[in-house]
Image (cartoon, rainbow, N blue to C red):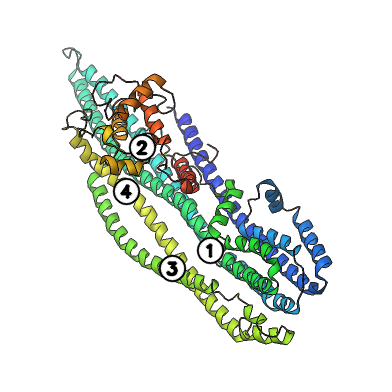
Amino acid sequence: MSTPSRFKKDKEIIAEYESQVKEIRAQLVEQQKCLEQQTEMRVQLLQDLQDFFRKKSEIEMEYSRNLEKLAERFMAKTRSTKDHQQYKKDQNLLSPVNCWYLLLNQVRRESKDHATLSEIYLNNVIMRFMQISEDSTRMFKKSKEISFQLHEDLMKVLNELYTVMKTYHMYHAESISAESKLKEAEKQEEKQIGRSGDPVFHIRLEERHQRRSSVKKIEKMKEKRQAKYSENKLKSIKARNEYLLTLEATNASVFKYYIHDLSDLIDCCDLGYHASLNRALRTYLSAEYNLETSRHEGLDIIENAVDSLEPRSDKQRFMEMYPTAFCPPMKFEFQSHMGDEVCQVTAQQPVQAELMLRYQQLQSRLATLKIENEEVKKTTEATLQTIQDMVTIEDYDVSECFQHSRSTESVKSTVSETYLSKPSIAKRRANQQETEQFYFMKFREYLEGSNLITKLQAKHDLLQRTLGEGHRAEYMTTRPPNLPPKPQKHRKPRPRSQYSTKLFNGDLESFIKDSGQVIPLIVESCIRFINLYGLQHQGIFRVSGSQVEVNDIKNSFERGENPLADDQSNHDINSVAGVLKLYFRGLENPVFPKERFNDLISCISFSAAVAIYRLGGTEES
């Protein structure tokens, strides 16, 4: 390849890398915007709740007509929002927003006002929402600091990858140049040797000496170029190994950030939000239930929504709302240089000993880091549990306010002695903020340690596979060729006439107890047959077999026979697969319980997303 073409190819590789890094950088900025927008929406939601309860307290005495106007006012305000459009579409909202909608509907059902209820609204519920708003803003600022640090670390990793890639390209180019010069020297040597082979009887003595001197010079030049080529080749191999190791570490770091760290950051933003909102709304529920039992039906609906305040499901919905921001990017691929097809770490001499030493060092370092990081993790989890205990304290029950006099004085005195006591509030909030500060410090320390472990573990695993493959290759050369698996010997089943339970359309557990077969013969035999003859068959379990043959095989199994026992493939593979599907489809109790269907679907969705990422795909693919 000519020099201009080589430079053009290098520019294309660099441009492609820079484009991918630019996309990740833009995605990081978009993530921060999404989190900031979520916080603003929460603050606005909490402000609306404060306004709502304040206004509700003022118009309790006029309850019927005025409460209907209040509900209409807030419903009109939310009809134009994105949440309302989503609610009209599929009623799939974030749990706090869902509570807000149900709360508005409940207002229309309220039938009576009371001074106690008005006082609780003013001095308890509204204050809680103010505190939640302050906490949400504070949590976002602290999480934002950590996210900036993670973004900076991620960009450092990408810059490191860029540096080692450039180094690899430079050394590989020098190796190619040295190889070209060596070949040129070899051609000159061959040409000079050919000239020296001409008849010498007519050549003067002086000219003979000149030719000999020229041959020696060419030999010396060839030796120098050979040494230079060997040196550059070694540098190229080492640079490529370093590039591949850094590439693996970079992909591992990016994967960890998008799959784990990003989720943890969202959890930090959500820290205490749902639990605190739960407490505030439960205060409202307690007052409403004790005020008037005739409204229990509507309040039960709201209680169910409050019970559904779940940060995990809200986090999942939030990430689904912004798929382009939170979808992991494609893996960085090895960018070969000048047709270099070696895309694996080379463990051959003279770098094998160096790689082995590096592998041992990584193994020792990882063992130490994992122990240290595990201790930090335990401290972080214990601190998180302490914070969760603080924000989940059950202090929302106001039933005592309704056990005696319902006068305003009674309510004030009772409330002031419990939650609204200023010394108690100041002490609890000071303890909470101090614990939060310690948690975020340990959380940052844990993320930094786990990031370092992820990078080192990626390099360790790649070296382990590389060094292990050399030993396996040596072992495989001495192994005999793969043989097909031997058919398993099946013990002779009891005659079907001795069974009291059905094989097809029956209960699996009852059949196993009755027949004594740990695995029903039909399952074991069909899977064995498919394993022998059907793994390379196109359309397995999709293409239907012969119904006549399916019935024949089924009837044989019903009689206690094993029609698939022989080693001859005299049955249609689609028919055998059809019998197996027919058996599982007819079970009275399915192998996977129906009540676990949604859990399995959730697992499959997450596994599919991870698989797509590992294959270098996108969410749309």
Camera-side residue: 158 or 619? Answer: 619
Q: Where is residue 228? Give x, y as percent.
A: 29, 38
Residue neighbourhood size for the residue with mark 4, other residues' Cα within 10 Å, grouped as few (<14), some (14–19), many (≥20): some
Residue count near mark 1 (Cα–Cα under 10 Å), binned few <14, some 14–19, many ≥20: many
Q: Residues within 10 Å of mark 3 (few under 14, many from 20)?
A: many
Q: Amino acid at mark 2?
A: Cys
Q: CA distance from mark 3 to mark 4?
A: 27 Å
Q: Secondary structure at mark 3?
A: helix
Label number found at residue 343? 2
Q: Residue drawn at (32%, 28%), measured in percent from left and top?
A: 530
Q: Residue at x 16, y 12 (%)?
A: 201
Q: Find residue 177 and report its horizontal and vertical position in percent.
A: 36, 33
Vertical order, 443 against 428 (above or below): above
Q: Residue at x 26, y 36 (%)?
A: 498
Picture quarter with the N terminus: top left
Q: Quadrant of residue 40?
A: bottom right
* Secondary structure of residue under mark 1: helix
Q: Nearer the viewer, residue 437 or 519?
A: 519
Which quadrant would residue 557 be assigned to in this image?
A: top left
Disc on the earlier residue, 4 or 1: 1
Q: Which residue is mark 4?
A: 461
Q: Secondary structure at mark 4?
A: helix
